Amino acid sequence: EVQLVESGGGLVQPGGSLRLSCAASGFTFSSYWMSWVRQAPGKGLEWVANIKQDGSEKYYVDSVKGRFTISRDNAKNSLYLQMNSLRAEDTAVYYCARVRSAAGTPYYYYAMDVWGQGTTVTVSS
Amino acid sequence: DIQMTQSPSSLSASVGDRVTITCRASQSISSYLNWYQQKPGKAPKLLIYAASSLQSGVPSRFSGSGSGTDFTLTISSLQPEDFATYYCQQSYRAFTFGPGTKVDIK
């Protein structure tokens, strides 16, 4: 069964740090781009970051640049999100997602086709 | 950055109704547009990718169309399990989600 399981969420004070993990199973993890997406309480979805199969390319939403770092360990089938300098507005459910690709012109078509159940991050004093 | 808008923000419909949701991009994104369904407390589910391609396992009552800046998600005959929030998402340049459209029971 294809599965993603997030962990590492919790309560952290403003300015603090947290590291989220996402364990993948049931597919060849090293063959896929991966993403983190978050959802603040009662709000919509916000894409956070993407990482290429070999970790050589990483992209972030402007609001987390310089504070969050996405990484992966293909030997462990794991995706990570290191979150530093956390703010109240980072409070959200964080989902990891697998990114499927299909040939397109001029770029590949990318979509998030497998999602984890989410892990909750609360930034509060 | 590419901004996404959706209309309406919410709608009420009955089982069996034909439902149409519109998504607009702030610049041309060709067909780099996906649609997701999310139910309360659950992770999103991919419905449509590349504007009009149905994701495996998704019922054929869901369809997508459009190109450039204007896109549409259509549910041909609304079923009880379709009451949810729907998001569009562009993948032309990084990723951006639309604000969502909540479909509830009339």
Image (tube, coloured by chain):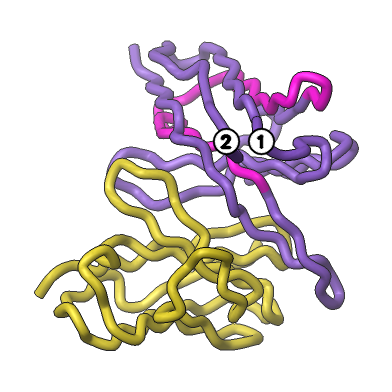
Chain colours: A purple, B yellow
Label 2 crowd bin: few (<14), some (14–19), many (20+), radius 10 Å: some
Indicate the secondary structure of the residue bearing disc 1. loop
From the top left corner, tell me how far across and down residue B79 is, in percent: 25, 73
Magenta residues span A73-98
Q: Quadrant of residue A78?
A: top right
| B12 sits to left or right of B88 | left
| Outermost residue, left side | B106
Proximity of marks 1 and 2: CB atoms separated by less than 8 Å: yes
Do tags 1 and 2 sit on the same chain? yes
Q: Chain of mark 1?
A: A
In the depicted view, which residue is nearer to us: A56 or A27? Answer: A27
Check disc 2 and report the residue beneath it: A3
Q: Is residue B37 visible?
A: yes
In the displayed structure, A40 sits above or below B5; it is above
Residue type, label 2: Gln
Residue type, label 1: Gly
| B23 sits to left or right of B76 | right
Q: Confirm whether the magenta stretch covers residue A95.
A: yes
Write the residue at 65% across / 45% down.
A98
Question: Gap between marks 1 and 2, in whole Å?
Answer: 6 Å
Q: Is residue A62 visible?
A: no
| B103 sits to left or right of A87 | left
From the top left corner, tell me how far across and down residue B98 is, in percent: 47, 64
Say the numbered circle drawn on residue A39: none
| A117 sits to left or right of B66 | left
In the depicted view, which residue is nearer to us: B22 or B53? Answer: B53
Check disc 1 and report the residue beneath it: A26
Q: Quadrant of the C terminus of chain A?
A: top left
In the displayed structure, B75 sits above or below B1; it is below
